[in-house]
């Protein structure tokens, strides 16, 4: 697929022109481009560009949400025009509780359908019990859990544990499990896939790892204590951050929201006992705040406040030290 189609498609999203975006995608199908290629090489890169526009403050949250709705229309239109036959087997796919970024999972579901899988889509923020119920109802070949943000790893672990106890296989996918899927493996998934294309390959090869390792112990007492102190920690570090009135409506626009996000990422890092979870979250948040406010002091101040309040939390201190090391020098 040439770059012209990608540029035109992103321009349609930027203009919030749904008819044009759908037309471009369907035009490629009519020209013989496979539906999975349209989704992976046209739609996914456009979503990444939209995310970068939000991160640097060029696009508001409302505009990104509107563009996301248009992409959902495109995915639906592509699926209707090119339905899969479901001949290869069944997959149940959804996001764990609290994970509302369902579009990557929706795209993955459609790509799997295009490769012959019948997919039962649970959508965003599905409880572990919902995954298990669908496992019993549909008897799928695999249950796939999609996690876009690492902050949701504890809930993803609940899904993985519940499905495996019920006798199902689990495929963990999405950026939240790490670029190489390491946190999916750590939490006991039978296989991992960073992208929808990887998921297709894993299912085709049947590369399962059940029985080769036990689920790693999680953060235990320290994580539980962090959860108990969450409200106090958020209030403490929010007081350190400068307000940005122009971004108050954004999910991370207020000091309290920014602090809550960072505290929850720290909790996820402690949960999986890997400071890289927190280091990656710090790097992303540092870039976000610098792009929006022009300041590179906010995250450093938050890390200092957390370090002072959590002096008796050894795993958290390790995570905080790794986060400080990941920040770009002033």
Image: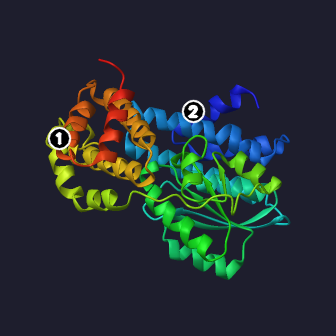
Using a 10 Å C-alpha cutoff, classify the residue at mark 2 as few (fewer than 14 neighbours), some (14 to 19) or many (20 or more). Answer: some
Up/down of 214 relative to 285, above or below: below
* Snapshot colouring: rainbow
Give the distance between the C-alpha atoms of the residues marked 1 and 2, in whole angstroms. Answer: 47 Å
- Residue 220, image x and y in percent? 37, 61
Which residue position holds label 2? 11
- Residue 326, image x and y in percent? 39, 28
- Left/right placement of residue 34 relative to residue 281 reads right
Foreground of the two, 227 or 26: 227
Q: Which image quadrant: the C terminus?
A: top left
Residue, x 66% and y 59% (percent of image)?
Answer: 190
Which residue position holds label 1? 308
Residue, x 52% and y 57% (percent of image)?
Answer: 216
Q: Along the polypeptide, which appears first: circle 1 or circle 2? A: 2
Point out the frontmost of discs 1 and 2.
1
- Residue 193, image x and y in percent? 66, 49
Q: Are marks 1 and 2 in contact (CB under 8 Å)?
A: no
Using a 10 Å C-alpha cutoff, classify the residue at mark 1 as few (fewer than 14 neighbours), some (14 to 19) or many (20 or more). Answer: few
- Left/right placement of residue 240 relative to residue 324 reads left
Name which quarter of the figure residue 109 lies in.
Answer: bottom right
Name which quarter of the figure residue 117 lies in.
Answer: bottom right
- Residue 315, image x and y in percent? 34, 47
- Left/right placement of residue 84 relative to residue 79 reads right
**SS of the residue under disc 1:** helix
Q: Which image quadrant: the N terminus?
A: top right
Foreground of the two, 284 or 280: 280
Residue 287 visible in the displayed image: yes
Up/down of 47 relative to 74, above or below: above
The extreme bottom residue here reads 137
The extreme top residue here reads 330
**How many numbered dots are placed on residues in this image?**
2
């Amino acid at each position: 697929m040439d770059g012209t189609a990608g540029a035109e498609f992103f321009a349609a999203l930027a203009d919030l022109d749904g008819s044009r975006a759908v037309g471009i995608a369907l035009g490629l199908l009519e020209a013989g481009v496979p539906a999975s290629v349209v989704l992976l090489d046209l739609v996914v890169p456009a979503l990444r560009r939209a995310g970068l526009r939000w991160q640097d403050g060029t696009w508001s949250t409302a505009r990104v949400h509107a563009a996301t709705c248009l992409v959902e229309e495109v995915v639906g239109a592509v699926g209707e025009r090119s339905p899969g036959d479901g001949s290869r087997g069944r997959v149940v796919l959804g996001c764990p509780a609290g994970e509302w970024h369902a579009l990557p999972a929706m795209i993955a579901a459609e790509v799997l359908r295009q490769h012959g899988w019948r997919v039962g889509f649970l959508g965003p923020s599905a409880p572990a019990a919902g995954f298990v119920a669908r496992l019993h109802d549909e008897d799928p070949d695999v249950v796939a859990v999609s996690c876009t943000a690492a902050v949701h790893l504890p809930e993803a672990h609940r899904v993985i544990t519940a499905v495996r106890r019920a006798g199902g296989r689990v495929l963990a996918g999405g950026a939240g499990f790490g670029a190489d899927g390491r946190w999916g493996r750590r939490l006991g998934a039978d296989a991992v896939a960073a992208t929808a294309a990887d998921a297709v390959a894993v299912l085709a090869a049947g590369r399962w790892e059940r029985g080769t390792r036990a689920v790693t112990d999680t953060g235990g007492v320290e994580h539980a204590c962090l959860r108990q102190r969450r409200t106090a920690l958020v209030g403490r570090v929010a007081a350190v951050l400068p307000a940005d009135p122009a971004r108050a409506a954004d999910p991370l626009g207020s000091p309290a929201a920014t602090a809550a996000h960072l505290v929850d990422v720290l909790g996820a890092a402690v949960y999986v006992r890997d400071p890289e979870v927190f280091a990656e979250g710090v790097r992303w948040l540092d870039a976000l705040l610098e792009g929006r406010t022009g300041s590179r002091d906010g995250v450093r101040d938050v890390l200092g406040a957390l370090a002072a309040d959590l002096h008796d939390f050894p795993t958290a201190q390790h995570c905080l030290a790794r986060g400080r090391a990941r920040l770009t020098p002033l």
